[in-house]
Image (cartoon, coloured by chain):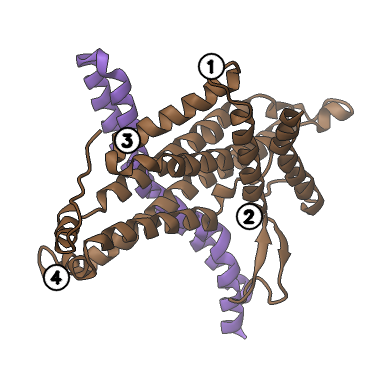
Chain colours: A brown, B purple
Amino acid sequence: MIDYGLIAMMILPILACIALKVLFTPASEGVNISGALVYWQSEAGLDSPTSLYISESQVNSWAVIISILGLCLYLTHGLTAKASLKRQLVAEWIVEKSEKLVRDNMGGFFAEWGPFITAIMGLSAFSSLICLVGLFSPTGDVNVTFGWAILVFFLIMHFKFRGGLWNYFKGLFKPIPVFAPMNLIGEIATPVSMAFRHYGNILSGAVISALIGSALTGLSRSLVGWLPGVLGDMPLLRVGLPAVLSIYFDVFSGVMQAFIFAMLTMLNVAGAVPWDDWNTRRKKRNKPEIQNTAA
Amino acid sequence: MLELAMGIMLGLLGLGAGCAMIAGIGPGIGEGNAVAKACEAIGRQPECKSDVTSTMIMGCAIAETTGLYGLIVAILLIFVAPGSFTGILKDAIK
């Protein structure tokens, strides 16, 4: 009984999002490439810097979060020591794979980071895949990916400051003081490039899909428009080809970008730790030395 | 006067978006090189196929970034810039 409830928890938020989108989409003809629909906004207006609004991307990502929570609860519900259910094997496979991935790429010190990395990867992958049911991908909105990238930036900074603030600022002026502005730009470029990479890939897929759809509609109108009745109005050429292209642009690209975002998070965070400076500081406070055991 | 200025502005924005996508050449060449080398490596050591493939896809995705910057500039020029530039033009001509 709980299983059915959890399956409903996975599916119902997506259906609610579809219903909300159908209610709010303005009637239009032809090509329509636009950003996220705005569901609610404060009275200040969209152009004002103090405006607050809730758009399609936020609502869709909340729905994805609830669905992933439902999926996790469904996979881990009713665990037994002998693994009598198939879904327990799936859950164990996911946990083992994520822990191995994190351990291989970040080292033993970060071994407990598996859940965080898997959460980023799962959220990103499912946010991109949600466009398969006709919804706007939250990752096609630069605000969403920038939010994740800023989170990663804070993690990187947290570990960089572990070596001491003074050591960090001295590091900016290496190898010679002239490089300081470039080093500063390099620090900021990491989250910017992560956010733009993810956003650009998903958005370009969506734009190309929309362009191909409209082109095929026009082509079929001119080729088979002479057919009588409903047949002439239907864009017959749109059957098939967009689905094949969607396998690359939506499925492959979305999953790939999720993997890359998680991979870059791991590499950047693990590479940010200044081990020597940190251990020197710890030695001054009579704390034990920390080593990152590889693999 | 306003119509002429508008037309010139929109045409130049389209032209600029096209020029921005010249950035697509770089990632094309770079990814082509990466895949060629990966094919060579797999041919030399077929047992390393999975490692080489995953590393190659990772590298390709990172090499794509410069092209995507160009794409984002082009998208901004087509979808975002006309809205803000039209207002500036109207204010200037009034």
Asked if disc 1 and disc 4 are in contact, CB closer than 8 Å, the reply is no
Give the camera-side residue of A74 and B42.
A74
Q: Marks 2/3: CA distance?
A: 32 Å
Instruction: Tell me the mark number nearer the camera, choosing from 1 and 2.
Output: 1
Where's residue A3, x and y in %? 71, 28
Disc number at residue A82? Answer: 1
The reply to whether dot 4 and dot 2 touch (C-beta < 8 Å) is no
Give, as a three-letter code, the residue at label 1.
Answer: Lys
Q: Quadrant of the N terminus of chain B?
A: bottom right
Asked if the residue at tag 3 contacts the one at tag 2, i.e. Cβ–Cβ closer than 8 Å, the answer is: no
Secondary structure under the numbered disc 2 in the rendered image: helix
Q: Residue furthest right?
A: A229
- The residue singled out by tag 4 in the image is A178
Q: In this image, B65 relative to A163: left or right?
A: right
The mark lying in front, picked from 1 and 3, is 1
Q: Real-space Cα distance between discs 1 and 2?
A: 40 Å
User: Residue beneath label 2, please?
Assistant: A58
Q: Is residue A34 visible?
A: no
Mark 1 or 2 closer to N-term? 2
Q: In the image shown, does A22 or A216 lie closer to the viewer?
A: A22
Subunit of mark 2?
A
Q: In the image, residue A140 lies at what x, y percent? A: 56, 49
